[in-house]
Amino acid sequence: MQPMTVRFAPSPTGFLHLGSARTALFNWLAARSSGGRFLLRVEDTDKVRSEQRFLDEILEDLGWLGLDWDGEPIFQSRRFDLYRSKAESLVERGLAYRDGEAILFRIVPGRKVAYDDLIHGRIEVETEHIKDQVLIKSDGSPAYNFCCVVDDAELQVTHILRGDDHISNTPKQILFYEAFGFAPPRFGHMPLILGPDGSKLSKRHGGVSVTEYKEEGFLPEALANYLIFLGWTPPEDREIIELPEAARLFSIDRMNDVQAKFDPAKLKWMNGEYIMRKGTAALVPLLRDQLRRDGFPFAADEERDWEAIAGLYKIRVKTLREFGPMVEFFFRDDFPVEEEGRKKHLEPEASRVRLAGLVPKIAALPEFTAPALEALYRAEAESLAVKVAELIHPTRMAVSGRTKGAGLFEIMAVLGRETVLRRLQRNIA
């Protein structure tokens, strides 16, 4: 495979959209799989809407997703003189003309512009359907299609992978390449990402920017994995594949030419898989960062065994944001209590009597471990001639306020004997 030189060209007029992130991922995969270069070009010609804060966020999100680029980013706003010079050269050759302060490229009718799209195959357009193209606008700024060609030619870009919404731009750009005597790069256009209802992905389908998913507690590996599967089929039948391996297996000829629907439930499932597989020690700082963002004060608590808590719950969540409500009872005695569970498992007199009988035995237990606690509860249930669940459910409600969660005895071991006894006695009273 010949090394590919590709580029990702974000516009800093907003946050990184999921569709743009997917475009960046595919270009990165093309470069890394071929031993080529992945370049970054900032299309900041819109002086009014371009903002540094958007650029900072875009660069941060790309790095968060695991993407690196070769060399320094190129800024179109710093190249206006070059674009004007190139446009003037076309005027001198009679291929373009002035219209006031603007410069337009003359489209010659009666010919066909054709190219072999890497994803869709042969595409042909008659020049009768293309009007004269603006090169330089009346305010002195370059038109999108023109400055892209100037930059891509100078950077020696060999392949351009982008969304289907650019298909109409490609014939115009090919005409510019021809006018300068440049060989056009290979073009590949990816079908756009659709919402679950089949319409264009938008805010009404949920989050559409990478930042939103980062804040919701999605892992970058999971989001990257999901996005590349919205347009590419790996040679092996699998659903979990991290970027380095995807780069090893990637080839453009396995990219799909049909539109893909964004499925939030599938993404959540995939994120849950990544959380479950992640080493607990590596998960802890991510979890605590999420808790800080979500405003949980106990994120700063250094006393608790964070690895044990994360280990208990990482198989039970789909996003990091779900951790907070599940684990706050480890850190505070005034935790929320499920009212229905309280009425069912703690209000009955029999439940409180059984808990009262357990308290001295828990206090006297030689080792406060999950196996020792389980043995105690099973022995107590046998002596009382009740199911062990009759002891487990009231205890779970008393120590956690929840009817479901991680294994009770593991929870009790992490909470510690003193906390467990205090909470049991409070509920007995």
Image (cartoon, grey):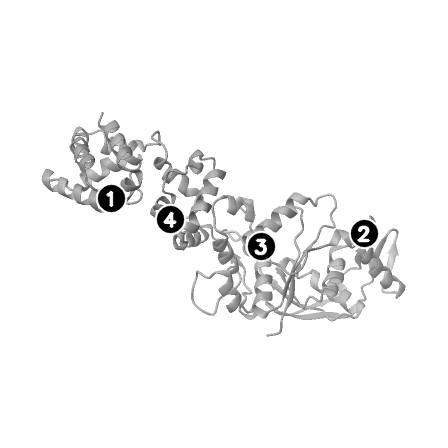
Q: On the rendered structure, is 221 left or right of 98?
A: left
Residue holding disc 4: 314
Toward the top, the furthest residue is 429
Counting residues from the start of the chain, the first of labels 3 and 1 encountered is: 3
Quadrant of the rendering where the C terminus is positioned = top left
Q: Amino acid at mark 2?
A: Lys
Q: Nearer the viewer, mark 4 or mark 2?
A: 4
Counting residues from the start of the chain, the first of labels 2 and 1 encountered is: 2
Residue holding disc 2: 137
Judging depth in this view, the residue of 96 and 287 nearest the camera is 287
Residue holding disc 3: 21
x, y percentage for residue 333? 33, 30
x, y percentage for residue 86? 83, 61
Identified at 38% across, 43% down, the residue is: 306
Q: Nearer the viewer, mark 3 or mark 1?
A: 1
Picture quadrant of residue 423:
top left
Judging depth in this view, the residue of 164 and 85 nearest the camera is 85
Q: Is residue 54 above or below residue 362?
A: below
Judging depth in this view, the residue of 306 and 427 nearest the camera is 306
Q: Nearer the viewer, mark 4 or mark 3?
A: 4
Q: Is residue 343 above or below residue 282?
A: above
Counting residues from the start of the chain, the first of labels 1 and 4 encountered is: 4
Q: Are marks 2 and 3 in contact (CB under 8 Å)?
A: no
Label 1 element class = loop
Counting residues from the start of the chain, the first of labels 4 and 2 encountered is: 2
Q: Nearer the viewer, mark 2 or mark 3?
A: 3
Counting residues from the start of the chain, the first of labels 4 and 3 encountered is: 3
Identified at 67% across, 51% down, the residue is: 11
Q: Residues within 10 Å of mark 4 (few under 14, many from 20)?
A: many
